[in-house]
Amino acid sequence: MAKFYGIGVGPGDPELLTIKASRILSQIDVVLLPQTKEGKKGVAYTIIEPYLKENLEHVYVNFPMVKDESIFIEAGKEAAKEVEKHIGLGKNVAFVTLGDPSVYSSYGYIIKALSKDMPIETIPGITSFCASAAMINQPLVEKDEILSIIPMNATDDKIGKVLEASDAFAFMKIYNRENRVLDHLNTHQIINNSVLIKRCGFEDSQIDPDIKENILKNKDYLSLVLSRKGCL
């Protein structure tokens, strides 16, 4: 029976793709990919390309970078229609996403829109914040510490409450919000225990512990900050 797969391809390094993900990718008939500008191959596709069938069918879906939740819901419904159409033809379909499908991925909007009897399997991937911790050879959390994943599109009030309550932090979605990251790090006196990681998993990845000096320079969309109360 045909199945829909949501596949996490990890942070960028093709060697961090799981064995299961590579096996499933070699078997699928249709791949759903985020629509990119000028028809270029997306980052996720460049990671999976070596594992795909030559005659694989590509379907591009559009999830616009907007704040309006209703637009995302509609985009999920349109993508779900494509999934159901191909599954109905007996084809195995996969949606691929950087990192893990359960972490800030458009995948969630697709599965919410699918019919309840749709066969679905989610293949986890290595998250950018876990890979970044490995990159700097530091634990994310220890003992009874609490880790919080902070998306910088959240409100300052919400972020401030999380910073008060937790011990370690991964600041995500920081692109063009770097000044707000600095403000929170300074307010909670953790800027000296923070590291900026750019393009984790890629050949041109960077580690920069001097956030105060460099976070506003050479900004990159694939960036995050790891921080904690106490030494990092």
Image (tube, rainbow, N blue to C red):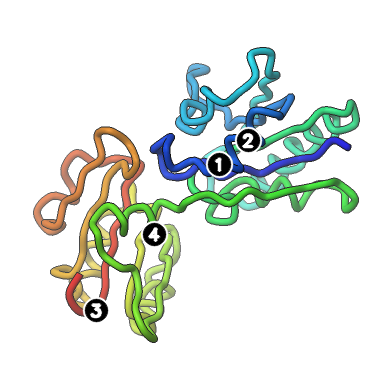
Q: Secondary structure at mark 3?
A: loop
Kindly report the distance in space between the C-alpha atoms of the residues bearing marks 4 and 2: 35 Å
Distance, label 1 to label 4, CA atoms, is 32 Å
Front residue of this view, candidates 23 and 5: 23
Comes first in the chain, label 3 or label 4: 4
State the residue at coordinates (49%, 47%). Answer: 99
> Could you tell which of marks 2 and 3 lies nearer the N-terminus?
2
| Marks 3/4: CA–CA distance | 19 Å
Image coordinates of residue 142 in percent, x first then y, are 34, 78
Q: Disc 3 marks which residue?
A: 229
Choose mark 2 or mark 3, whichever is in front. 2
Q: Residues within 10 Å of mark 4 (few under 14, many from 20)?
A: some
Which residue in the structure is indicated by mark 1? 19
**Mark sitting earlier along the chain (3/1):** 1
Query: Which one is closest to the eye, mark 1 or mark 4?
Result: 1
Callout 4: SS: loop
Mark 3: which amino acid? Lys
Residue that numbered label 4 is attached to: 152
Give how far apart the Cα atoms at labels 1 and 2 are: 6 Å
Q: What's the amino acid at mark 1?
A: Ile
Q: Position of residue 214 (x, y in %)?
A: 13, 49
* Residue corresponding to mark 2: 23
